[in-house]
Image: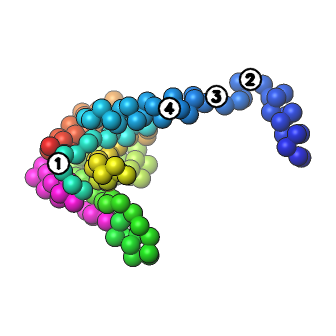
Amino acid sequence: MNRSDLRQVARKAPERTRMRLASPSMFIAVVVGTLMSGGLAVAADGLKIISSHHGSKETADRLEAAIKAKGMTVFARIDHAAGAAAVGLALRPTELLIFGSAKAGTPLMQANQAIGIDLPLKALVYEDSSGRVWISYNDPNWLAQRHALGASVEPVTLAMSGAIDAVANEAAE
């Protein structure tokens, strides 16, 4: 089949099977406007993004300290920029912290073990091309929806969401 044939098939496809996308410029404008506003942005996919008032390393250090102060365990801290440098590639400062609490995560996995793909929780600290530093993480409430956990674990996800919001805000201030 050549391109002309493909175009004809696409034109004949029922309207309901064609994808409709918002204008790319409109999407970019909304995302940039949200990010430039400062505080917290929440993307449709459950990703929360917070602007930090500190440099990348200091933000990651502050985040790690805040997580530990809340009684959670930091399982790993991955320096993606160092990994890139090790293979001769450049990457602005980017660190991933993997953390959590078995007391909070286990009830979620008891409801649906598939959520284990998203646990322990993760937070990414990174510097953008303008030198601004950001903390991003998945909202535990969104993760619960993603894995259809149901209302029985809502108190746990609300507590988790409050805890990660608190440590991220503490690190960013």
Nearer the camera: disc 2 or disc 4 = 4
Q: Is residue 83 rendered magenta in the image?
A: no
- Residue at horizontal 21 percent and vertical 54 percent from the top: 55
Q: Is residue 77 rendered magenta in the image?
A: yes
CA–CA distance in space, label 2 to label 4: 23 Å
CA–CA distance in space, label 1 to label 3: 39 Å
Residue that numbered label 2 is attached to: 15
The numbered mark, 3 or 4, whose residue comes first in the sequence reads: 3
Q: Amino acid at mark 2?
A: Glu
Q: Amino acid at mark 3?
A: Arg
Return the x and y of residue 173 as percentages of the image width and height: 14, 43
CB under 8 Å between discs 3 and 4:
no
Q: Amino acid at mark 4?
A: Phe
89 vs 34, left or right, is right
113 and 162: which is toward the camera: 162
Q: Secondary structure at mark 4?
A: helix
Return the x and y of residue 163 as percentages of the image width and height: 19, 42
Q: Secondary structure at mark 2?
A: helix
The numbered mark, 2 or 3, whose residue comes first in the sequence reads: 2
Nearer the camera: disc 1 or disc 2 = 1
Q: Which label is found at residue 171?
A: 1
Q: Amino acid at mark 1?
A: Ala
Q: Which residues are magenta?
A: 57-79
